[in-house]
Amino acid sequence: MESKESSLETSTPNVSPSAAASNAYALGLTQFQGFWIPSSRVPTSSIISFQKYFQALDDDIIVASKPKAGTTWLKALVFTIVNRHSYTLSNTPLNSANPHQLIPFFEIKLYRENSNPDLSKIPSPRFMDDWPVEDCFEMFCRGEEGYGPFWDHVLGYWNMSLEKPSNVLFLRYEQLKEDPVAQTKRLAEFLGFPFSIEEEKTGVVNQIVDFCSFNNLKDLEVNKTGKMAETILPNNKLFFRSGKVGDYVNYLTPTAVERFNNILEEKLSGSGLTFK
């Protein structure tokens, strides 16, 4: 990956010569600083502006995740943990707003609104649903997907979590599913809003876990019928899929799963990071 310094020397995007010939380009992806960017929504000029001018504050909280990796769930937990002394679960804004409205997308709310890109020159992207699963899998194995390659994306955060554990918490979806209470307490501790002994005794942690659970969130009226502006998803219910670990077996063949596991093992070799 290019260093930040070299990438800021010019405002000309570092586009791969092969991008135009790739399915990734047809999906509106542009290779920039080693990653595939959905440039129809996140112009590369805006990323440069963000890298150059954004200054994080000590009390900033940034949720960074891959799409369809529990982002909605994590945002709901973060919002509820941080604001639990301001709202009860009966009057929390989560009852009337999707988690993404309460914790907005960085790339849309900050990247785009701090630049004036010529979007007319960016091809209209096709949704992944328009592509056969086999084609999407091949692209994923090549690292050609939004904010991918996946392994480079997660390794960046994994390595930083080892280097600065007080600033970066690396949390796996599988961990949250396996023990949501323990991981919610871990998350609250990291955020600087730990649960008190009294809160644990009175069941506050379990109440938050239950409220922010997949089943409860997807059954809220705002997430069944609501819509949100500035998103590629036409309605809120599409933010909720199955909420299961290992659901890929219903879409990928055993051979494909083995192939991807081998790729992942190779790419993560020596890092200490593993996925089941």
Image (cartoon, rainbow, N blue to C red):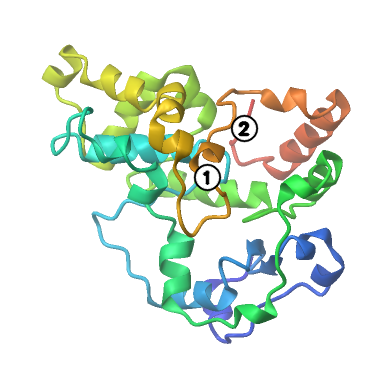
Q: Residue at x 80, y 69 (%)?
A: 19
Q: What's the residue at 33%, 48% (across, down)?
A: 102
In which quadrant of the rendered view does residue 37 lie? bottom right
Q: Does residue 126 appear to the left or right of 120 in the view shown?
A: right
35 and 110: which one is in front? 110
Residue that label 2 marks: 274
Q: SS of the residue at dot 2?
A: loop
Label 2: few (<14), some or many (≥20) within 10 Å?
A: few
Report the side of 187 relative to 120 (left or right). Answer: left
Residue type, label 2: Thr
Q: Is 237 on the left-hand or right-hand side of 125?
A: left
x then y, percent, for residue 139: 80, 50
Which is more N-terminal, label 1 or label 2?
Answer: 1
Q: Which residue is drawn at 62% across and 70% down?
A: 2
Q: Which residue is under mark 1? A: 235
State the SS at label 1: loop
Residue 216 relative to residue 259: left or right? left
Question: What amino acid is labelled 1 in the image?
Answer: Asn
Residue lying at the far front in this picture: please name it. Answer: 225
Q: Measured along the vertical axis of the image, is residue 17 above or below residue 1?
A: below
Which x, y percent locates residue 215?
46, 22
x, y (%) of residue 179? 43, 18
Q: In this view, does 53 lie above or below 241?
A: below
For the residues labelled 2 and 1, the Cα–Cα distance comes to 34 Å
